[in-house]
């Protein structure tokens, strides 16, 4: 931590005496991105255990968006899409090593975010924003791919998932960075007790976020805080104060701590008097990982399946927009939205023209945020898995062109993306093409995707007559990016991150021996 | 309707001038009981279509009870339990014609609520309450079983479900009563358009409720209004104003109209200045009827299966308590509650001692309502199906002693109580006994009942060691009532209800030929 708690509170006290000294135009932007948190994990979205009084209050003070989507049912591509405003199939966060396979950035991945992409923080710099990412990056861990090479001014967090502990010989533990240098590794300096689930990481991430907000407010500089805590990704963790506090085990404890953190951040904005000049958006990177079992997985509410899939449970996300004085309190917008819209919307709020040399998939939702009765009617949602367009939503209708959960082999070994759920012909264990006759659902009447609309109905024909040309146009215009998630190599793992020498924590990398990564599902 | 709209508004205006003239002690009691509405149908419980701004506001002004249950996954027994404070197996609302079979009161049923039972309105009379039921009765349709013979002073509604239309020869259309005489029949004087779903019934029921509240307030008499609208029971209906207004078809339209009605009732209480002296409770009779298909069935949120079953989707109910100035706003109570508690709690609020000559299953929740941090810790929930105790919940744990959805034969014919859901060994299509080794779930971590706790764990043993003695004690003390739902006879149908002569609507009954009713599931 870069400031002591004492200084921190002193600054808060000073600022609260001089309220509203720091009203910016353009607004500060805070995107809170959760990891594997499901739509159904928030009280306001129906979680029976109701662990989120702060998020529920945030929704009551802002706007709830029940039809908000990620761009991919897996972490890395989803995050790449958020920061580029473009589908993973365009920005390179996909693989061509297999058809419709999910891919991400484990330690052995060679690739990362392409230099050709223009990230949100790079754009925001044009208007003097200071950008910080707190938490999980996941856009490549080799030096050139790290946040400070890609528009962020500050970073506290890790490049990969907090898997482990590893023995540092076959596989190194994941480093935690402070800006451009590592300051330790998970399970070493940054403990996660796999048995009890105890870890202080969320508290550290909270403190890093609060500290940044205070500093930028004092400096009177607009800021972008990308707060990407990962406590709800397995192995799920919480600090001692929250462990055992929820009614649903470790996962609920983690949710309570994240909810507490959100409350602390919003409360600080009010204390600093910058709540009217700070746009805050809360969402998650993909659906709850139902495979993680009852103690470590979240809830996708009434939706089908979870993470890794292109059913609603895999891609519909909790979403709350908050900006007192600008976004009306207690509103609900049924607008179909996407994490990619956060790119475009943030630019619009900052008064920056988006890049005009490329296709952007994100839309500017600012008009909707400022007036909930507005909608962008014909906005489709594309559900991709790797290199394949699996499904499309338009209005209330969703057409599946391909269905797949995972392979029979994997399923028989106990990997189940849809535990307790089985919709014949829909939750298939082979990659089933419906390209000639898509499966169509009405997500209003049937949010659980259980009752395909008969192909013999007028409704089916009418829907397809509207969706088909959109798909055709999309495919025609689609120029896939260079796939970044094809090559793996044990040599590229986090053996010797920058700063390791100072800590005596450099490890010896094996000889380079690249291979084509195998993606199972 | 007994008063014209003009008079009605005149009275409201007069009363609003003399606010608070009518603060009662004991409080008025309003129980709003929905029909087949699911836990997940309310915005506040996560319905993506968010059709319930009034109910969501009611929750924000009152108390939400996410762990509230019905006493049976079917309408008649559930309603009998609510009004008697006793399990159906005690009050006679069950059948012994088959093991663990659900039974209710179709027109051919001979039985009804036993004379030996003491209904809530009968008890409330002791303190001068005037009692009205609006809507569906369902405790027997033969003369001796009707509401005015069982403690109610007024009734506007019908004795049975609004199935039909019938041709009045093989089966009569269901009569609608105003107090002790019929005033018409469904599909005749009281239209329900099966094609469009249009019907004004909810508007009529709303008006009846409002009118009663105004009259009792003017008379300064404490009242009990049992508002039992049935628009969300298939065939689902809504009035023209609401048809097509929701995002999920006819079912959502019906929800919107019911939500509107709840808003009107609460708003009237405030207008009359009696909100602080009127206890209002909103709930439903059983889980959403998932068999009714995507256009006519509701949502059980994250829970397993629906109506007819003893999984959470069949018996966990939406529940909101509202009593400004008495119940703190925006509270959540995790107390395990039951519709049977409405009996006992209402008596407690009215200052009436409950009957002491019988076992009551309802508890007095008034202490919890008035102080949400209180709980009655060791309170079990018993999940019955007909004459069998299928499951028990204690704290966060639920033990299934029997599992069954419906028979293979029925299932193969397309009757599915758990569409899209299948938990091996749990959603069984034979009546499977687990009495020697119950299936145990932790409903906090696993509200969807997907991950049975291994019998080899300490947790399993510990849980059973607490639940088993409770079950044993319950069975020891259980004296089943005389089953009222065993005999059927075409002669007892609603051929010639009281008042039919005046309307020229008497039909000729066939000769009595009783048989033992067959209950399929």
Image (cartoon, coloured by chain):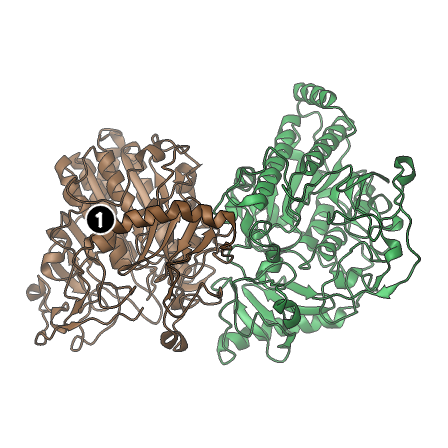
Chain colours: A green, B brown
Q: Residue at x 15, y 42 (%)?
A: B357
Q: Which residue is mark 1?
A: B83
Which corner quadrant of the image does residue B160 belong to?
A: bottom left
Question: Is residue A315 positioned above or below A165 on the image?
Answer: below
Q: Is residue B489 left or right of residue A519?
A: left
Residue A73 x, y percent position in the rendering: 66, 59
Residue A428 x, y percent position in the rendering: 59, 72
Question: Is residue A300 positioned above or below B338 on the image?
Answer: below
Which chain letter matches label 1? B
Q: Residue at x 66, y 23 (%)?
A: A19
Residue B99 x, y percent position in the rendering: 28, 66
Furthest-left residue in this view: B501
Which corner quadrant of the image does residue B140 belong to?
A: bottom left
Residue B168 x, y percent position in the rendering: 17, 75
Q: Residue at x 35, y 53 (%)?
A: B258
Is residue B449 something one can see in this rendering? yes
As helix, strand or loop, the secondary structure at mark 1 comes to helix
Q: Is residue B401 left or right of residue A403?
A: left
Mark 1 crowd level (few <14, some 14–19, many ≥20, 10 Å Cα): many
């Amino acid at each position: 931590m870069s400031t002591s708690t004492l200084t921190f509170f002193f600054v808060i006290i000073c600022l609260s005496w001089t309220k509203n000294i720091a009203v910016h135009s353009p607004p500060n932007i805070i995107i809170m991105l959760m990891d594997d948190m499901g739509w159904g994990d928030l009280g306001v979205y129906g979680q029976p255990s109701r662990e989120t009084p702060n998020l529920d209050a945030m929704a009551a003070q802002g706007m709830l968006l029940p039809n908000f989507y990620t761009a991919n049912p897996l972490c890395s591509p989803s995050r790449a899409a958020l920061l580029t405003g473009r589908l993973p199939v365009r920005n390179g966060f996909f693989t061509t090593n297999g058809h419709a396979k999910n891919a991400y950035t484990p330690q052995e991945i060679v690739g990362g975010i392409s230099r050709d992409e223009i990230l949100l923080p790079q754009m925001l710099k044009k208007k003097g924003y200071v950008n910080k990412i707190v938490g999980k990056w996941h856009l490549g861990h080799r030096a050139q791919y790290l946040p400070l090479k890609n528009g962020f001014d500050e970073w506290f967090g890790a490049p990969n998932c907090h898997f482990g502990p590893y023995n540092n010989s076959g596989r190194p533990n994941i480093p935690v960075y402070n800006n451009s240098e590592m300051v330790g590794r998970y399970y070493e300096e940054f403990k996660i007790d796999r048995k009890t689930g105890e870890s202080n990481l969320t508290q550290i991430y909270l403190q890093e976020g609060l500290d940044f907000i205070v500093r930028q407010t004092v400096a009177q500089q607009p800021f972008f805080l990308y707060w990407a805590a990962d406590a709800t990704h397995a192995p799920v963790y919480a600090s001692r104060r929250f462990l055992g506090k929820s009614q649903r085990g470790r996962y609920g404890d983690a949710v309570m701590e994240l909810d507490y953190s959100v409350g602390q951040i919003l409360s600080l904005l009010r204390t600093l008097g910058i709540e009217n000049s700070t746009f805050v958006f809360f969402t998650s990177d993909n659906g709850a990982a139902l495979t993680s079992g009852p103690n470590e997985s979240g809830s996708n509410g009434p939706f089908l399946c979870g993470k890794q899939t292109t059913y609603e449970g895999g891609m519909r996300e909790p979403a709350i927009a908050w900006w007192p004085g600008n976004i009306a309190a207690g509103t609900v917008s049924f607008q179909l939205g996407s994490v990619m819209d956060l790119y475009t919307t943030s630019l619009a709020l900052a008064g920056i023209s988006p890049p005009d040399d490329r296709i952007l998939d994100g839309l500017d939702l600012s008009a909707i945020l400022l007036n909930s009765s507005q909608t962008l009617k014909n906005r489709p949602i594309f559900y991709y898995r790797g290199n394949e367009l699996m499904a499309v939503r338009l209005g209330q209708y969703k057409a599946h062109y391909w269905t797949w959960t995972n392979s029979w082999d994997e399923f028989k070994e106990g990997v189940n993306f849809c535990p307790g759920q089985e919709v014949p012909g829909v939750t298939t264990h082979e990659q089933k093409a419906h390209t000639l006759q898509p499966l169509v659902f009405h997500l209003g009447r049937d949010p659980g995707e259980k009752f395909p609309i008969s192909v013999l109905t007028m409704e089916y024909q009418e829907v397809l007559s509207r969706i088909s040309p959109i798909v055709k146009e999309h495919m025609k215009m689609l120029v896939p990016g260079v796939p970044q998630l094809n090559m793996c190599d044990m040599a590229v793992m986090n053996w010797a991150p920058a700063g390791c020498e100072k800590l005596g924590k450099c490890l010896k990398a094996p000889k380079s021996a690249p291979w084509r990564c195998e993606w199972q599902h």
